Image (spheres, helix red, strand yellow):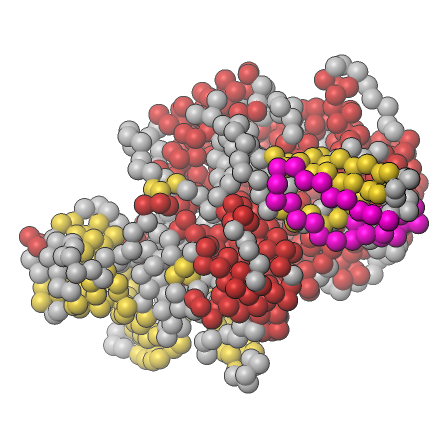
Amino acid sequence: MTDRPKILRAKDYKKPDFQIPTVDLEFIIHSEDNTTVRSKMTVIAQTDEKKPLELLGENQELISVKIDGAIIDKSRYTLTDKSLVIPDVPDNFILEIESRINPAKNESLEGLYKSEEILCTQCEAMGFRHIAYHLDRPDVMGRFTTRIEADKDRFPTLLSNGNLLEAGDLQNNRHYTIWEDPFLKPTYLFALIAGDLGEVKDTFKTMSGRDIDIRFYVDKGDEPKAAHAVESLKQSMAWDEKMFGRECDLDRYMVVAVGSFNFGAMENKGLNIFNSKYVLADPTTATDDDFENVQGVIGHEYFHNWTGNRVTLRDWFQLTLKEGLTVYRDQRFTADHTSVALKRIKDVNMLRNSQFPEDSSPNSHPIKPAEVVNMENFYTATVYEKGAEVIRMIDTLIGRSDFRKGMDKYFELYDGNAVTTEDFVNAMELGSGKDLTQFKRWYHQSGTPVCEVSTSYDEEEKRYTVTVRQSNPDRNGEEQDPLHIPLSIGLIGKDGKDIVSKVLELTEKEQTFVFEDIDEKPVPSLFRGFSAPVKVRYDYTTEELAFLLAHDSDAFNRYEAGQRLATSEMKSMIGAMQKGKGAPLDDDIITAFGDFIRCSETDPAFTAQGLGLPSVAELIEDMQVCDYDSASTARKALMARLALSHEDLLLDGYDRLDDGKKYSNDKESIAKRKLKNSILSYLVATGKEEHFERAYEQFQKVDNMTDSIAALYLLASDDNKRRAEALQSFHDRWKDNPLVMDKWFVSQAMSQRENVLDDVIALEKHPAYDQKNPNRVRSLLGGFIGNHTHFHDINGSGYTYLADKIIEIDKFNNTLAAGLAKGFKKYPKLDEERQTLVRTQLQRILDAKPSDKVYEIVSKTIESV
């Protein structure tokens, strides 16, 4: 492309000129590279004014067009590589279109494509137009019936949305199935599967007494690995009934696992299609975190059945309407089945490591963008995770009971409709009686707000005062309007007990809250539970943070106190390094660390989480100029110093936890494994060979992937005599398991060895690596991008390598390439020398005439400086 692509703006939304209430589809699969698609649609004009019918379609060979049963001549329509336009059509008619597509040639993984040995679909956001001609927009909803025909030996499994109406054999060893989805849906929720798959069956009895037929489809031989996913689906169904009164509305619910998928999963009505990494799990191949991720993603896609499918979005600018709300729901679901406190900590860490940097990047955007070039670039942490935080704030402001009333009102008013974020907030207002007018600014403002807090205590008047000033400048540095922010606060007395615990509401730029009858100066616990996605500035003393770490009744803020202590220490170390000086370790930090470890037997899961130091991404977030080298060095140095100061204590803890018991996935065992591996990481951080040997011993003897990969990551992280041996052993055992090999690729891409980029380039030639498989690319290239010190090496080789890969991958999968292009997001905050290096590569990508998706990311990045 040479010209700038067209910018789409939310304010330009117009209702569709036509609706298509019924769609009958027929797929005749001749072979992997030849499928005939026939669509029969009822088309109804929505205006009195005569309008041309403009259907979207790409990468199809048009065979014929019929109106009310009669073939129309080519002179009556205009065909381009993007559309089919029929200028003169009746107000109400039957449109039939036949076309031919080539799934095997479709490497974009949009539309109907080949994933390993099966044919599958991905239609969100704009994939259906690669399958058949249609208006292909979310506010055009219809009832779909789908007939699929194929060779019985090659494709014995033929699936689509809804309930199975009919199946049978045909001549020449062919067979067919017919599926009917009784509910209105937009095209982005259409799904089709054709392959030879193993099947896992189960049932779920709903609260009304109906039996839901559950079917999971996986590669043959992987059926046992689907057991956890099946159980997670049943848990999701029960939880949604209990928490929101929502029952599964189909007779059959199906999930299919595929190996090549651009995303995590897709909530197609009644036929969810999943990246196999979020379905397949057993103790030998999946970690404890993998098991939790499977549970969460299974829940997320199921919850979409109501928040996304039954009530869908009017246009793609409303994406957070379904995604932010459903992420919030899946977070609550996982918390209820694991640990509320630990799940909250994990979610906030994800937000800070992914979304906060996005908020400060050239591609910063509100959860509801005002304009886009390609909407598929906005499946982001902002739309999803920050969107979930916005929903959580509504819950906090109106209370859990009224939130449920608001959700009930939402379904009552909008079931079967395509709606907006304003409609959702309206339902919340109706359910709670609370005015959320100012709160709606969260949907339209980008950036991470900063809340500066100051306090004072009048001992004579027994009055404690808290003043909060909120600030959120836009990308141009201009201050935006004040937001409505819930501030959950606790005031803690000397005995460690709460004097006050309540939710304050910030609505002004600066606001003061006065607490009377406070008998002693308290320690404030601010934004408990991370009650708003903001950065908090408060000048805590080291003693106050140690006190909160020991006594705060809010688990998140106990964790946060430890993180603040570590961050403060590392910032001091970074400052000293930048001046060419050393920085002694604060004795209070050493003491607090030891005390924290000694409490591990009481709550091993919380201790394990608390031992994790703030990431390099968090450390550089507030720097004017990103100093990855100093941040990484400081983090490693602090970890080593703490470990050396308490080496005996850590060894005792490791030996106690390394009890040789057989693997179990109960909560206590999961917590102990996490703590054991956290302690091992500190021991290895000392650099002592004996602790690398300890890691290797664990790697050799364990019976589960959690302990095995934890040890391998430590052994692969730097040069040691066991590194090559461990990597080879892991490879030889798992070389035929792609999902496990992804972990092997990551372990090397994230290594701190000097020649990491050479290793990454060499690994591209490995037989298990496939550049056209998104999981492989994310493990190797994504791992390298996350390896901050090596990716940002001052020689610029990391930047050149990434640009090469973006240009190459963009030619066949622009979604994947655009995601990689976000690796340059810190360009505006790099030093001048690195900025020059990055600018050269960004310009090289633009000169290569990239896709619209890549152009949008790269052009915004290069124009930010």
The verdict on residue 503 being magenta is: yes
Q: Is residue 185 visible?
A: yes
Asked if 225 appears above or below 420 in the picture, the reply is below
The residue lying at 53 percent from left, 75 percent from top is 247
x and y, in percent, of residue 789 in the image? 63, 27
The residue lying at 36 percent from left, 69 percent from top is 184
Q: Is residue 569 left or right of residue 429?
A: right
x and y, in percent, of residue 200 in the image? 53, 73
x and y, in percent, of residue 147 in the image? 30, 71
State the predominant SS element of the stretch in magenta: strand
Asked if 97 appears above or below 479 in the picture, the reply is below
The verdict on residue 97 being magenta is: no
The residue lying at 26 percent from left, 74 percent from top is 172
x and y, in percent, of residue 89 in the image? 12, 60
Asked if 646 appears above or below 171 in the picture, the reply is above
Residue range in magenta is 490-517
Q: Is residue 312 left or right of residue 214?
A: left
Q: Specify the quadrant of the image occupied by residue 649.
A: top right
State the count of labels: 0
Q: Is residue 768 visible?
A: no
The residue lying at 88 percent from left, 56 percent from top is 602
Residue placed furthest toward the front: 461
